[in-house]
Image: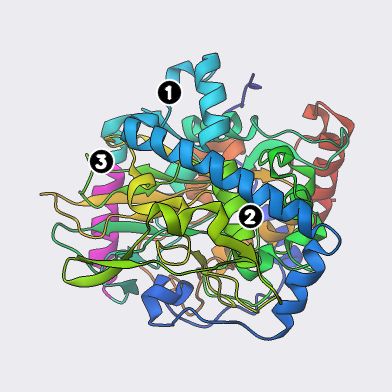
Amino acid sequence: MLRTIQTLRAPHRLSKLSNQLRTAATTTSGKAEGTIADSFASLSGQQFEALEPRFATVKEDLIKGNEQAVKASWERLLSTLKNEVKEIKRMGSSIVPQIDFEDIDNPSERFNSEYRKRGVAVIKGAIPEAEALQMKEDLKEYIKANPQTKSFSSQVYELYWSKSQIRARGHPNLLKAQQFLLSYWHSKDPNALFSDLPISYCDRLRMREPGDAKFALGPHVDGGSCERWEETGYGKGQVYKDIWQGDWEKYDPWESSSRLPVESDLYQGAGACSAFRAAQGWLSMSHTSAFEGTLLVNPLLQLATAYFLLRPFFTPRTGPSTQVSVNGALEQANTEEYLSPENWKLEDKPSSWLQGANLGRGQELNALLHPHLNLPETMVHIPKVQPGDYVVWHCDGIHAVDKTHAGKSDSSVLYIPACPLTERNAEYLVRQRDCFLRGTPSPDFPGGVGEGQHVGRAFQEDIAAVSGVDGLRAMGLERFDEGAGRTPGEKQVMASANRILGFN
């Protein structure tokens, strides 16, 4: 399934390369300073409400001529969801597929089918436990040496260029695991400019301490929010065309060519993603179980995506009839009558509501706005993880964080998604490479001085020393081998990437 990823640890012409890169680098405008709280309405105190009036027209245009087909598809979707919710309640965390790193060259058919259906997986032992633990200890020393480091509640640190992060992103095992994950994507266009060779997308890290209840990020989806409905966003590739035409069963979450032209950050949101992150992911640096500050996922990839996209087009005939007290707060009880397809109809006149979406913020979901997902039951904890395990989920996957860390030790992770080599991602690499050379935050994240003056941050020589040529390529610091491309499209995207990165 996988090509062999070579590891070259010989010295590189880094001084010459540095001059090339500084010549090729663009000037990064950068985003305003901030933290992860600026990326989500629920963390920043913003309320969910109707958007600008133009979004009513956006919605109307999306399903024009297909209203009855969409209505019928909604009814089928609610029926299917009802059965799948029962299955998730029965299986709990065991529904999340797992695979040992040593088995990724020959995965079982069961793993293949379950990963495609659920959109989430755990790769056990992607990095040896001792290495992962050492990364955490080195990070603690790095933070201690640089007390000016920004963070959200001393939990999510605005760090991108520590040696631990560089070591993890370029680890041969992790690059191999990412290539394995990217191999699940396919294209209806045989010449699509897509390669399953991964690039490094440099994200933050989390060190959540026992007792924390501040980093309580509820169910959400990354990669933009309003953009999913907009013609100039995901509409550029018609990613969700089948859903808008009333045929959600034909929607393929793993089709790659439609994702290539997508604009997922139309509003310069803090933390909004402009690169194509095919799989979100983090590398564990702790032993963590359920309710210990870990991750929750919604293993309904195709169904949940169709639901939260179609939800804004429908409204209940009658509201929920009862309320229940949950931890002292009143919440609606979604009765059978309320959830029944007969109780839901297409809006008589399109509103400007996109439930859970706000300009420049992440897409959020909750039981009030998205009742049929039964989020209290379908958001399941991932299985217990140990240091070195790699947890991944599809870029459209709904995920959340434990409301409270009730464990007895830290819950620490490095956020490391799996990103394919595409032209857009090569363009992102140029901007990210410039940030790396300057020591400023990655381009998708809140800006500022960053680590430019941090003691002990990583440099090019560190990448070459620990990751070799593959790690340098993943960071845009070494040209891609066009001769290694297996298809015309892959050869072309490698050639384009080399040109974009300034190597031609």
For marks 3 and 1, give the CA distance. Answer: 21 Å
Q: Is residue 161 magenta?
A: no
User: In front: mark 3 or mark 1?
Assistant: 1
Image quadrant where residue 349 sits:
bottom right
Question: The residue tagged with tag 2: helix, strand or loop?
Answer: helix
Q: Give the quarter of the figure containing the N terminus.
A: top right
Residue 368 lies, in percent from the top left, at 41, 66
Disc 2: which residue: 15
Identity, as a three-letter code, of the amino acid under mark 1: Ile
User: Is residue 285 visible in this depiction of the protein?
Assistant: yes
Q: Which residues are magenta?
A: 133-147
Dominant SS type (magenta): helix
Q: Is residue 212 left or right of residue 14?
A: left
- Name which residue lies at 14% across and 53% down: 406
User: Is residue 419 visible in this depiction of the protein?
Assistant: no
Q: Is residue 139 magenta?
A: yes
Disc 3: which residue: 133
Question: The residue tagged with tag 1: helix, strand or loop?
Answer: strand
Disc 1: which residue: 99
Identity, as a three-letter code, of the amino acid under mark 2: Ser
Q: Is residue 388 left or right of residue 364?
A: left
For marks 2 and 1, give the CA distance. Answer: 41 Å
- Name which residue lies at 66% across and 71% down: 347
Looking at the image, tell me whether mark 3 or mark 1 is earlier in sequence order: 1
